[in-house]
Each structure stands twice: as C-alpha cells, then as structure tokens.
Amino acid sequence: MNFSSILLSWYAINKRPLPWRSDIKPYKIWLSEIIFQQTRIDQGIAYYHRFIEAYPDILQLANASIDSVLKLWQGLGYYSRARYLHQTANIIINNFQGEFPQDLKELKKLPGIGNYTAAAIASICFGKSEPVLDGNAIRVYCRFLGIAGDTTKSSTRSEIMKAANSLISEKHPGDYNQAVMEFGALHCTPANPDCSTCPFRNHCSAYRQKTVSHIPYKNPSTKKKNRHFHYFCISDESLSFIYLLKRQKKDIWNGLYEFPMIETEKESSLEELFSIVFFSQHFKKDLHIRSTENPAKHILSHQNLFLCFYHIIIGEEQNLIPGSDWIKIKTSVVHEYPVAKPIADYLQKLLK
Ligand code: SF4
C-alpha cells in the first residue's frame, strides 16, 4: 500500500479550512506553529487572528515592544514562546532581510524554533522533504507501524523519525506533514480513534494486534514541583494606584508584570510570612490587610503553583518603602500591562 498517497487523499477531503492554509506564507506558518505548539486549535485560533491583525507582517512584529507582544499573548501560557517570537522577528529583519531561511539547520538556530517547527516551515513553505513529529504525527506513526517503545526516549524518537523519513511524500512534503498531523488530530485520536472507517485499517499494526489503546507509550513524567507564591497587591484606600514589578528571573512568566511577592517552599500562614524580612524592609507601620484570597492552584506542565493574594492598604505613603524595581501604576491603566492569567483574574475581580 502507498501510505502517503492514501493519506494525501484523506487530507484533500477532510482538512480543516484554517486561515494559514489558504495563503501559505512563512510568517503565517511560523506564527501558527508557535501558537499551536502547546495549544489546541480551538483555544488558540483567536490569538492567531489577533496577532495577524496587530502585526500583519514580520516587520511590524519586530518593531512592536515586547510588552505589547506579551500583552497580546496574555492567557495563552508558555510565555517564552512570545519572547522567542519577538526575538526571532528581529533576527529575521536584521540578519535575513526580512525573509525566513529555507535551510533546516539555519531555521533551527532561531530562538524558539526546534526540530518540529523548523521541519514544518521547511516543508510547508519551501517544499523540503523534512518530516514533522508532533504528538499527533507520533501517534499515527507508532500505531500504524506498531512502535511500542517509550516515546520520550531518544532511541524511540529515532525509530519514529526513520519511519517518517521513509514514508514522507517527496513530491508534496508540506501537504503530507500537515496531513499526518491532521489525521492524528481528527481521526487517529488519543482516545477512541475511528478505526472502523480508517483507510489504513487493514495495514495498521496496532489495529491488527489489538494494541491501539497502549500505543503510543509515554513514560509517566516525574513528580511535579509545588511552589507557593504570596502576592501583595499594595494600594491606597481608593485603589487609585497599585504597585507592579517586572519578572526578570529565568523562570516562568519572565517579562510579565506581577505584584511584589514572596515565594515559599511550603504553605505559610500570614503570621509566618510576617517574620520574613520583606515586611520590615518595605513597611514602616502595622499593616492594614483588607482581604486575603485562599490559595488557588494553578497547574503548569512541570509545576503546581499555589497562589495567595493579599490586598494591603497603605494609609500614608511615607509608611511604604517601595523596592527599587517596583513601579507605581495608576489602576486606570493597569490593563495595559502584560500579566499572567491568575493575576489578570485577581485584578479583574478587585477592580470591577
Ligand atoms: S486503524 Fe485505528 S489506530 Fe490504526 S491508523 Fe487507523 S485510526 Fe489509527
């Protein structure tokens, strides 16, 4: 059987009419691949349209401020993607005269572009025979060929890549790659794949051996780290201003704004927090804590965050000694600052 021609026929009938597919441009393909790396199509499509509207081409994205790019990204998570987007746009403008390189190795040197995105751009935009391996493609290859090894292991990945290289359509590598990902997303789904109407049914190893539900196999990831963030929203009585600062550490939410905060390794009461030098450093008098929100759990891929918010009212401004990196912001413009979703949610409740 000819895997690629059957797959391409399936794709011609079943592909979704996504906006970047009707007008193949490296900028649009790159943007869509970055947005949809860790995001479902239905979740990310509004972001794609928002970015194309705000930055119709790569020059406008490069000329934008990183704060406005992060603001537009707000709520999508994995914020390093937005920072890399901005860095790569600037490199393309400054070093490549505004044109994406066509070579896989050159593409992979750009920030935020790994094997997967480089292969997608090279094949879809420039017709290079480079297979893409995202979660959907991996599932299709593993099931069809009966590859049962741990897909997080490099030896299994090499086996899948070798198979993908032998199956890819040399004539239509871009359509082929999109087809295999689309087939995984719509037909050979993680749970309840539609094997009964599958065009590969008679040749699918997992189907024949009744191992579909066990393939692909992924070793359960290691235990997640728990982190406790205590945020202090400091304002005057009438909430005319608050303090924010920009996260600068190599850590989650780098480049986003947040309230002054303390991080602890375990859950801590307010009394325990009071003993931390942060308070004597920044507040001269007893504190007026207007409200405390119970810790809310925010789950990320490798860590669980427990976020607690304290609203502190400072009566007299001279009672406060702001940190050197704190920025006093009028609450009327706070919505212009990019913040992580839990902080945006807290501010929305506080200011409504
Ligand atoms: S037969 Fe089932 S498991 Fe095999 S490729 Fe088709 S949908 Fe996937």
Image (cartoon, grey):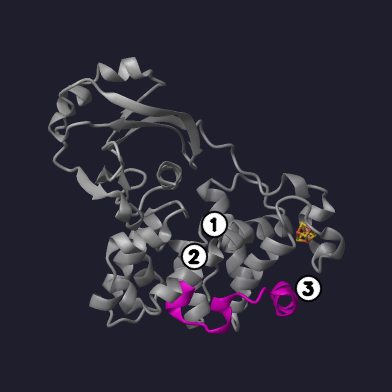
Pick the front one: 252 or 45: 45
Which residue reaches farthest front? 238
Residue 109 makes an appearance in the image: no
- Residue 3, above or below 324: below
Distance between mark 2 and mark 1 Cα atoms? 10 Å
Residue behind mark 2: 47
Q: Which residues are magenta?
A: 1-30
Residue behind mark 1: 39
**Closer to viewer: mark 2 or mark 1:** 2
**Amino acid found under the numbered disc labelled 3:** Met
Sequence-wise, the earlier of marks 2 and 3 is 3
Residue behind mark 3: 1
Q: Which mark is residue 336?
A: none
SS type, badge 3? loop
Q: Is residue 242 left or right of residue 184?
A: left
Q: Residue 255 location in percent, x, y?
A: 29, 51
Query: Magenta span has 100?
Result: no
In percent of the image, x 40 and y 21: which residue is there? 266
In percent of the image, x 27 and y 18: which residue is there? 274
Pick the front one: 196 or 80: 80
Sequence-wise, the earlier of marks 3 and 1 is 3
Q: Is mark 3 within 8 Å of ligand 1?
A: no
SS type, badge 2? helix
